[in-house]
Image (cartoon, rainbow, N blue to C red):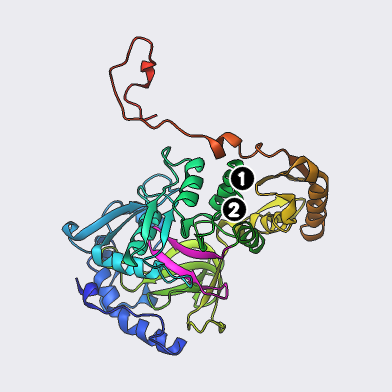
Amino acid sequence: MTAALTRRPRLGDWRSHEELAASRRARLPEVLSQAARTPFYARRLTEGATLDDLALTTKQDLRDNYPYGLLAVPKEELATYHESSGTAGRPTASYYTADDWHDLSERYARKWVGITASDTFLVRTPYALMITGHLAHAAARLHGATVVPGDNRSLAMPYSRVVRVLHDLGVTLTWSMPTETLLWAAAARAQGHEPGRDFPNLRALFVGGEPLSPARRRRIAELWGVPVVEEYGSTETGSLAGECEHGRMHLWADRAVFEVYDPATGRLGVEGSGQLVVTPLYREAMPLLRYNLEDAVEVSYDDCPCGWVLPTVRVLGRSAFGYPVAGRAVTQAVLEDLVFRLPVGDEVLFWRARAHADLLRVEIEVPDARREPATRALRAAIDEVLRVPCEVAGVSPGTLVPRSVLTGVHDVVKPRSLFGADEDWDKALLYY
């Protein structure tokens, strides 16, 4: 357990990027030694090999070596096992020791809006096999906060209950995908609450898991009247970057080596645009060497007013992919930004679009009184910025997100096998 014996850096332990890079180089021999204990890297690592000598580790490599091909410690030392969402075929497995969890929790808690013992923290991301809910839970408990384990894949936690918990418990911090916060706002209004007025204890919304355009971020902050604080990471790696008070996302370059891969040329660099490649420096159970997350990013080493001597990252993810319309690429990131530039008075929270070969069709949920000006303004913005033929239609609130989703309460019962004569026994053994 050599990684457990090594002190991990703290923010401010270094004064320059060069000093930080030197500390990473000093750490790498131990990282390679730990990786050589795994069946997968034992086949790849030759004597005297350095990180620069190695090919990228891919998601397919993780699938091909499911479940324990990248295990570097005895199974008895594992604390948790996880699988990431959205994998095809074999799962992408990840596992952590108790010491790994200290590292994970410390990194997640590096928020400019700190987590304290006086906080009530609603965790509204999946628990299950993904790491996201467990990570926020562990970080909050590390700092003494009260955790409300909300999940978001459970019938026991519908949006009506989320709003009740936010309001009645005086929740101060939340962790969710950005889209969730818009759904909460709609559900709150459906129950007679106003998001920016009736939740006075709320002081920040922590978000991650999907790209967030500047305009949507501003709209969420306007709705709730609190800062929106982004986090970036994955089930395979835990937290990789967090946001400073100036709104810039910083890579935790004291805890991992970050590289940018250009798939077109095969080149790896320390900054620029491409796919993010990561080598964790303090991973005990499952070392990863040059792991390609395949997320599109832009990495920069420009100075930041916050004083953190860390590179910054702009995460584009799948939003960098564009659908062709009339010879031009239309991306979700740009289209989302145009939608949320509409005035807050238009009350547009939900939208969808379909890219045809020669036409972009967009629908927005908007109250009848604002339908004509909102659709006209969005159509003009698309014409100006995207310059593609488009149709913009306004639909009534409840069309894209049904009111029953926002207000419904599900029956969640224990399974049973004995029923009365007038009861529905087709529900035998089912949890609903």
The residue drawn where x is 29% and y is 74% is: 31
> Contact, CB < 8 Å: mark 1 with mark 2?
yes
Mark 1 crowdedness (10 Å alpha carbons): few <14, some 14-19, many ≥20: some
* x and y, in percent, of residue 392 in the image: 78, 45
The residue drawn where x is 40% and y is 56% is: 132
The residue drawn where x is 72% and y is 38% is: 396
Give amino acid for label 1: Arg
| Residue 232 drawn in magenta | yes
Q: Is residue 129 left or right of residue 317?
A: left
Q: Is residue 60 left or right of residue 313?
A: left
Disc number for residue 215 = none
* x and y, in percent, of residue 251 in the image: 47, 73
Disc number for residue 195 = 2
The answer to which of 423 and 244 lies nearer the viewer is 423
* x and y, in percent, of residue 247 in the image: 57, 72
The answer to which of 73 and 343 lies nearer the viewer is 343
Give amino acid for label 2: Pro
The range drawn in magenta is 226-249
Check the picture and name the quadrant holding the N terminus: bottom left
| Count of labels in the image | 2
* x and y, in percent, of residue 120 in the image: 41, 58
Q: Can residue 290 be seen?
A: no
Q: Can residue 165 be seen?
A: yes
The residue drawn where x is 39% and y is 70% is: 107
| Residue 279 drawn in magenta | no
Label 1, label 2: how many angstroms apart (C-alpha)? 7 Å
Image quadrant where residue 41 sits:
bottom left
- Disc with the residue nearer the chain's start (1 vs 2): 1
Residue pointed to by mark 1:
189
Circle 1 — which element? helix
Q: Is residue 10 left or right of residue 396?
A: left
